[in-house]
Image (tube, rainbow, N blue to C red):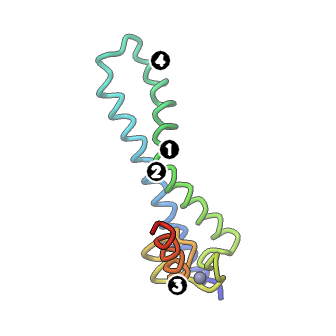
Amino acid sequence: MALKKKELKEFKQILMDERNLLIKNANDTIKNEIELSKDDMSDEADLASALIDQGLSLRLRGRERMLIEKIDGALERIESGEFGICIACEDDINLNRLRARTVTTMCIACKEEQEQRERHYQG
Ligand SMILES: [Zn+2]
């Protein structure tokens, strides 16, 4: 059984808010870096814009980018009607689990199984 429209809307809002916050944080970090290095610059405007381009792509290559990709994936699943359905066993993912971890793609049973397998292979 798929999620109700109201619940999908709720999750979509959570994901969008989280996405905006990640992008804002990334931008703030870059702005701070530019502020700090301003004194060393000869041609401020050029350097600043160069730093913004570089900084943003560097930032987004890290943790934020990974999270944003996960969020985008979850948003896509909302659009396609796959959100809330486990990718491994195709059962419904528990609503409380989704609330705690909106970007999850697996039900608890499958996730635990996966983690156990990983532990096993890692010895
Ligand atoms: Zn499952």
Residue 75: image x %, image y %?
60, 64
Work out how far the residue at label 1 is from the one at label 2, CA to CA, in angstroms: 6 Å
Which of 90/51 is in front? 90
Which of 51/90 is in front? 90
Q: Circle 2 sits on which residue?
A: 64
Q: Upstream in the sequence, badge 4 or badge 1?
A: 4
- Residue found 47% across the figure and 46% down from its top: 62
Circles 2 and 3, Cβ within 8 Å, touching? The answer is no
At label 4, the amino acid type is: Asp
- Residue found 63% across the figure and 86% down from its top: 91
Residue 101: image x %, image y %?
46, 72
Any mark on residue 109, and which? 3
At label 3, the amino acid type is: Ala
Whereabouts is ligand 1, in terms of quadrant? bottom right
Task: Please name which of the two marks, 4 or 1, marks the residue nearer to the observer.
Answer: 1
Question: In the picture provided, is 53 more to the left or to the right than 36?
Answer: right
Q: Circle 1 sits on which residue?
A: 60
At label 2, the amino acid type is: Glu
Work out how far the residue at label 2 is from the one at label 3, CA to CA, in angstroms: 27 Å
Q: Upstream in the sequence, badge 4 or badge 2?
A: 4
Work out how far the residue at label 4 is from the one at label 1, CA to CA, in angstroms: 21 Å
Q: In which quarter of the image is residue 76?
A: bottom right
Any mark on residue 46, and which? 4
Q: In this view, does 30 lie above or below 63?
A: above
Task: Please name which of the two marks, 4 or 2, marks the residue nearer to the observer.
Answer: 2
Give the secondary structure at mark 1: loop
Specify whether tag 3 is near ligand 1 (CB below 8 Å): yes
Please identify the quadrant where the C terminus is shown.
Answer: bottom left
Question: In the picture provided, is 107 more to the left or to the right than 123?
Answer: right
Specify whether tag 4 is near ligand 1 (CB below 8 Å): no
Q: Quadrant of residue 93?
A: bottom right
